[in-house]
C-alpha cells in the first residue's frame, strides 16, 4: 500500500544502515580491532531509534493509527511465542512466515518494524540475547520490508509469489547471518576472513565456506517458509486484511 515520502526516507536510511552493518568486513583495514562484542552494541544503538523513528513517522503521516499500533503489539507477541517452536533446529524457522504475510498486508514500514520487534521480543522470552541479535533483527526486518514491496497480485498467483519470496528470503537471511559472524568465528586461515587480502578475495572465501557449511541449514529455513506460506498463507492473509480494514494503513 502507498507510503509517504518521509516513510520512504526513513526506510532508505535503514537500508543504508543495514548494508553497512552487514558489509563492513569487506572494507575492514588491517590492524582494525573490531569484535562481535564491540560491533553489536553499535548496531543495536543505531537500530532501536531507527525502528522507533519508522513508527513515529508512520503515525504522524497517518499511515498507522492506535489500532494499527495495537495490532503490531499483538503480532509481535505472536511471533515471540511461535519462534521457539522452531528455534532454528535443522533450519526450521517459523517466525518468517508471520513477518512476510504481515509485511505483505500492512506494507514495508510495518513489516520492517514487526521483524525487528518480533526478534527482540522472542530473544527476551527465550533468553537468546547475544551479539547476534542486532543482525537478526535487521535481517528479519528487511524480510518484512521487502515483502511489502512485492508486486500486487491476487489469488493463487499471490501465494506462489510469496512462497517463492519466502524461499529466497530463507537463504538470504542465513547468508547474511553467517557473514555477520564469519570474521570472528572462523579465524584467518584457510577460508577465514583476512583483512590483508582485500574485499573480493574475502567474499570468495566466504561464499566457498557458505556453500560447504551453510546451504543445507538455509534450505531447511527456505522449505519451512514455502510450506507455511502455501498451507497457512491464504487464511492468514484474509484475517489480517480484515483487521487492516478496521485499522488505518495507508
Image (cartoon, rainbow, N blue to C red):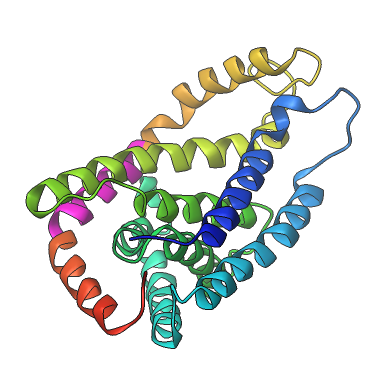
Residue at image point 63% right, 18% down: 191
**Residue drawn at (78%, 54%) of the image:** 42
Residue at 59% x, 70% y: name it: 127
Which image quadrant: the C terminus?
bottom left
Closer to the camera in the image, 81 or 48? 48
Left or right of residue 243, residue 191 in this image: right
Q: Is 64 drawn above or below residue 46 in the view shown?
A: below
Left or right: 218 as drawn, with respect to 129: left
- Give above or below for 233 relative to 181: below
Q: Quadrant of residue 28?
A: top right
Residue 72 magenta-drawn? no
Q: Is residue 32 left or right of residue 73?
A: right
From the top left corner, tell me how far across and down residue 19 is, in percent.
Answer: 62, 39
| Camera-nearest residue between 60 and 130 | 60
Segment tinted magenta in the rendering:
219-231
Magenta segment's dominant SS is: helix
Foreground of the two, 246 or 188: 246
Above or below, 24 relative to 76: above
Quarter of the image that includes the N terminus: bottom left
**Residue visible at 72% across and 36% down?**
184
Q: Is residue 223 magenta?
A: yes
Left/right of residue 21 with respect to residue 211 in the rendered view: right
Q: Using the image as rendered, state which of residue 222 and residue 85 is in the foreground.
A: 222
The quadrant in which residue 217 appears is top left
For the view shown, which residue lies furthest in the left direction? 156
Quadrant of the rendered structure where residue 232 is? bottom left
Residue 193, x across and y down, in percent: 71, 23
Amino acid at each position: 500500500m502507498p507510503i509517504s515520502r518521509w516513510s520512504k526516507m526513513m526506510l532508505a536510511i535503514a537500508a543504508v544502515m543495514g548494508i553497512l552493518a552487514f558489509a563492513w568486513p569487506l572494507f575492514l583495514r588491517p590492524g582494525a580491532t573490531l569484535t562481535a562484542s564491540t560491533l553489536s552494541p553499535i548496531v543495536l544503538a543505531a537500530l532501536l531509534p531507527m525502528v522507533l523513528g519508522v513508527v513515529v513517522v508512520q503515525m504522524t503521516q497517518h499511515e498507522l493509527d492506535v489500532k494499527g499500533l495495537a495490532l503490531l503489539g499483538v503480532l509481535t507477541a505472536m511471533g515471540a511465542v511461535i519462534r521457539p517452536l522452531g528455534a532454528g533446529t535443522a533450519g526450521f524457522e517459523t517466525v518468517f512466515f508471520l513477518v512476510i504475510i504481515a509485511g505483505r498486508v500492512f506494507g514495508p514500514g510495518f513489516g520492517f518494524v514487526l521483524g525487528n520487534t518480533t526478534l527482540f521480543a522472542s530473544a527476551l522470552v527465550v533468553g537468546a540475547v547475544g551479539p547476534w541479535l542486532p543482525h537478526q533483527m535487521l535481517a528479519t526486518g528487511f524480510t518484512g520490508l521487502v515483502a511489502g514491496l512485492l508486486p500486487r497480485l491476487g489469488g493463487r498467483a499471490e501465494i506462489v509469489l510469496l512462497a517463492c519470496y519466502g524461499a529466497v528470503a530463507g537463504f538470504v537471511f542465513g547468508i547474511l547471518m553467517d557473514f555477520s559472524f564469519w570474521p570472528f568465528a572462523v579465524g584467518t586461515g584457510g577460508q577465514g576472513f583476512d583483512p590483508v587480502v582485500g574485499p573480493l578475495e574475502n567474499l570468495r572465501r566466504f561464499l566457498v565456506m557458505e556453500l560447504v557449511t551453510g546451504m543445507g541449514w538455509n534450505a531447511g529455513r527456505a522449505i519451512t517458509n514455502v510450506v507455511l506460506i502455501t498451507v497457512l498463507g491464504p487464511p492468514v492473509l484474509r484475517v489480517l486484511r480484515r483487521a487492516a480494514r478496521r485499522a488505518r494503513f495507508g
